[in-house]
Amino acid sequence: MQGTLYIVGVGPGDPDLLTIKALKTLEKCPVWIAPKAHSEGESTALSIVTEHVGVADKDIVTHRFPMKPVQRAEDADETLVKAWNEAAKIVIDHLNKGHDVAFPTLGDPAIYSTGFYVCEALADAGYEGEIKVIPGVSSVGTTAASAKTPLCLGDERLLVLPATFENGEVASLLKTVDAVVFMKVYRVLDKMIEVLEAENLIDQATLVERAGCSDERVWTDIRQAASEENLHYFSTLIVRTKK
Ligand SMILES: C[S@@+](CC[C@H](N)C(=O)[O-])C[C@H]1O[C@@H](n2cnc3c(N)ncnc32)[C@H](O)[C@@H]1O
């Protein structure tokens, strides 16, 4: 019998934010394909789960997915497509041997996660077997919790944006909603600050780095964060547009 692929959200970094369902799923899968960004580095998703799930009996393949921007309306970078296709091949080989395969992924799989690119590559390769998605605690909610702010209440509107791709549209988007979550913000924080200052919203912005982790930092003056040389990639900005 063919195995099942589980895309498993493992939360934003604190191992205690791994759900019980994620934990049970990882425990029952003999094979894990763990994503990592750099060939020499470790898999963040894997490092999150190993505190609570034993790996001695697991067949763990760490697979590199280069950090390249993906614009959905355009063809993706070749090296990235290759990485997705190679991962799909590894997954299919194991599933065909009857093994259940887990793909642990940071936060929640539905939000900017490699897991769904691998699902697309599986479909492109003709795979029609079972795929299950185990939701995880997203950095979106975790950042709000650390900032001690709601994201939306009552009739308020919330927008989630990848800050790296917002070229000139941020100012007009900010006028249409009550709160914005800017992800992937760490390389473009200076630009964000310019826009927020121009829109008189700088005092309503909170940046959270490594939300939920023991080394978490929260900035209510995000200009201070911009002067940090070591701002972590895992940083998310929340802007409430109404006082
Ligand atoms: C590729 S996306 C992955 C999002 C993930 N699937 C989720 O649900 O949180 C990476 C972005 O998530 C955010 N992120 C991930 N972990 C975070 C954390 N612990 N604290 C703050 N932001 C985090 C950052 O904005 C980062 O640039």
Image (spheres, rainbow, N blue to C red):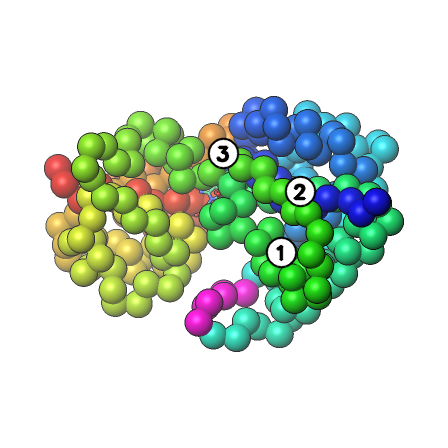
Disc 3 beta carbon < 8 A from ligand 1? yes
**Along the horizontal axis of the image, is 79 left or right of 181?**
right
Residue 153, image x, y percentages: 23, 32
Q: Is residue 57 above or below residue 111?
A: above
Give the quadrant of residue 190.
bottom left
Residue 33, image x, y percentages: 73, 48
Q: Amino acid at mark 3?
A: Val
- Residue 119: which numbered mark, if any? 1
Q: Is residue 192 above or below residue 31?
A: below
Q: Is residue 71 magenta?
A: yes
Q: Is residue 33 above or below residue 12?
A: below
Q: Amino acid at mark 2?
A: Tyr
Q: Main secondary structure of the magenta part?
A: loop
Give the quadrant of residue 100.
top right
Q: Is residue 27 visible?
A: yes
Of the numbered discs 3 and 1, the one sitting upstream in the chain is: 1
Residue 66, image x, y percentages: 62, 62
Q: Amino acid at mark 1?
A: Cys
Of the numbered discs 2 and 3, the one sitting upstream in the chain is: 2
Q: Nearer the viewer, residue 128 or 93?
A: 128
Q: Which element carries disc 1, helix, strand or loop?
A: helix
How packed is label 2: few (under 14 Cα within 10 Å), some, or many (20 or more)?
many
Cα separation between marks 2 and 3: 16 Å
How packed is label 3: few (under 14 Cα within 10 Å), some, or many (20 or more)?
some
Reading the image, the residue beneath label 2 is 6
In this picture, which residue range is highlighted in magenta?
A: 68-73
How packed is label 1: few (under 14 Cα within 10 Å), some, or many (20 or more)?
many
What residue is shown at x 63% (from left), y 35% (from top)? 48
